Image (cartoon, rainbow, N blue to C red):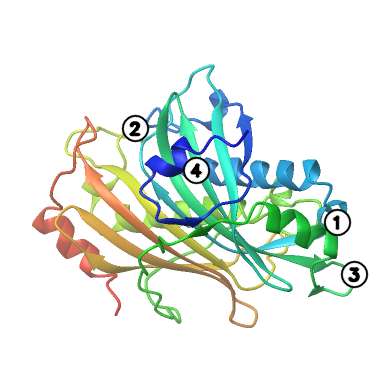
Amino acid sequence: MNDTRWLEQSGLDIRSRGDIFTVDLPVRWGDMDAQGHVNNGVYFDYLQDARIDFLVEGGATDMMSGVVAVSHTIEYKAPITYSEQPAHVQMIVLQRGAARFRVGYLIMHDGVLCALAASTLTPFDMDAQRPRRLTPDEVDLLDRHRWRVERPFPPLPKPALEGRGFHSRPLTRWSDVDKFNHVNNVRMLDFFQEGRIEMTTAADPLAARIGTAGSDEGRSLWLVARQDVDYVHQMAFRRHPYDMYTAVTRIGRSSLTLAAEIVDPSDGTVISRAQHVMVRADAEGRPCPIEDGMRAGLAHYLVD
């Protein structure tokens, strides 16, 4: 039986209903970050595992040989801390076209709603290197789980950075590569995380994260409230770095909105774009103002 309680309590405007796919995923000790809770990027691992289980249990074996992420959006509602209780993921289908579909997720832990998320995906012919149409069996699976939900994520600024912002040089690891022989979409979140940590620390030493090297006195606890990622091209493994640019698009009282791009320096091809909303907090996790000196440092990377 479908358990709709979480969907009904999530604030979503539900217009029609289908089946719900549910899965429990273990919370690993290695999922924790320096702040003592599951790292924001690990949530994308949970989303990926949930949709793989959905395809396997739904018998979508053709899609298992090729499906690529087009985009992800996630809003973080509460942290997940380590416990023996699994992360409980509910997954529904939001849209279905001829060669593309969008799924929605709720992530719960210990009876608390921790995140709302959505992914746009396309089945992909890896030999021909192009998207393919959904098969009749795949259409049937997706349509059984189809919900109509009216709650779009508010848009975030998506400027073309074109070399603007803080410059860093991410280097791929062999373990970043998945079965499709390109850097897995989840691992790109690691690169974006490194870029924004380097950028905020360069803007003001007091923007360095609590828990990193040096004294924590006066430092910042940054809580990620939202992340959007668009995958433009595949990212190949190699042992020379890519270029990444991280810029500020908005500075609020205690929040910061960023845009980032990963670029192939050999030809300027944009591999992936991301937007992040972060909240500066004190050691207890309460929002605190971005001070004038830090604001001036961050403004050095401000783009419109």
**Residue 233 as seen in the image, left or right of residue 107:** right
Rendering coords of residue 237 (x, y %)? 73, 59
Image quadrant occupied by the N terminus: top right
Amino acid type at image mark 2: Gly
Question: Residue under circle 1?
Answer: 65
Q: Are marks 4 and 3 in contact (CB under 8 Å)?
A: no
The tally of labels here is: 4
Q: Are marks 3 and 2 in contact (CB under 8 Å)?
A: no
Question: Residue under circle 4?
Answer: 106
Mark 2 burial class by Cα count in 10 Å: few <14, some 14-19, many 20+: some
Amino acid type at image mark 3: Asp
In the image, which disc is placed on residue 127?
3
Q: CA distance from mark 1 to mark 2?
A: 41 Å
Question: Mark 1 or 4, which is nearer the eye?
Answer: 4
Frontmost residue, 12 versus 54: 12
Question: Residue under circle 2?
Answer: 211
